[in-house]
Image (cartoon, grey):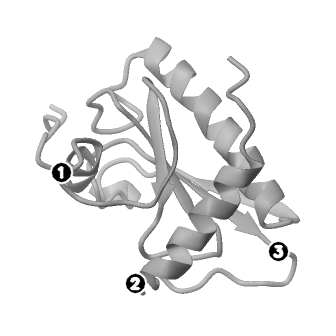
Amino acid sequence: MAAAYDPENVFAKILRGEIPSHKVYEDEVALAFMDIMPRADGHVLVIPKAPARNLLDIAPDALCALIARVQHVAKAASEAFAADGLTLQQFNESAGGQVVFHLHFHILPRIEGVALRPPGTMADSEKLKAHAEKIKAALGPFPG
């Protein structure tokens, strides 16, 4: 049996405004914000507002709406950081590498020849704020 969604997870707290974040995009479906331990410049997370533990328990219609927002933010992050490509990561359960048990997608703008940074290093808040502003400036209106 799958584990239940925990409304006290860190991303749920970010959604409720209990923990600050550098927001990039928000609407009734999703919130996108900067990863505080970025593996690349412009590393942004997109999460659903619906309480979903992972990809396996979100309603299909909510997932469709969410992935459209992931694409929207990914296009802006790619443009903002003049990326040669993107890495999109999504992990499910501990065995799959998931650490925060609220569904989330990692968007990492990639530059040819530049390796990802190792995980676990906190970024400077002012740098994250600047990166968020850079992505927001590249975001047009949501096409939906």
What residue is shown with label 3?
111
Q: Position of residue 89 (x, y in %)?
A: 56, 55
Q: Earlier in the sequence, mark 2 or mark 3?
A: 3
Q: CA distance from mark 2 to mark 3?
A: 21 Å
Give whichever of 84, 54 is nearer the camera.
Answer: 84
What residue is shown with label 1?
9
Amino acid under label 3?
Answer: Ile
Residue at the (13%, 34%) spot, across then down: 4
Q: Quadrant of residue 65?
A: top right
Q: Position of residue 73 (x, y in %)?
A: 65, 44
Disc 1 is placed on an element classified as loop
Q: CA distance from mark 1 to mark 2?
A: 19 Å
Residue at the (55%, 58%) spot, across then down: 44
Amino acid under label 2?
Answer: Met
Tell me if mark 1 has few (under 14), some (14-19) or many (20+) residues whose alpha carbon lies within 10 angstroms of its own: few
What residue is shown with label 2?
122
Q: Nearer the viewer, mark 2 or mark 3?
A: 2
Q: Tell whether 79 sits left or right of 143.
A: right
Which disc number belongs to residue 143? none
Q: Position of residue 39 (x, y in %)?
A: 56, 76
Q: Give the quadrant of the N terminus.
A: top left
The answer to whether the residues at label 2 and label 3 have Cβ atoms under 8 Å apart is no
Amino acid under label 1?
Answer: Asn
Disc 2 is placed on an element classified as loop
Give whichever of 10, 6 is nearer the camera.
Answer: 10
Q: CA distance from mark 3 to mark 1?
A: 32 Å
Residue at the (28%, 56%) spot, across then down: 100
Disc 3 is placed on an element classified as loop
Q: Earlier in the sequence, mark 1 or mark 2?
A: 1
Q: Position of residue 20 (x, y in %)?
A: 29, 60
Give above or below for 85 relative to 30: below
Residue at the (68%, 27%) spot, across then down: 142
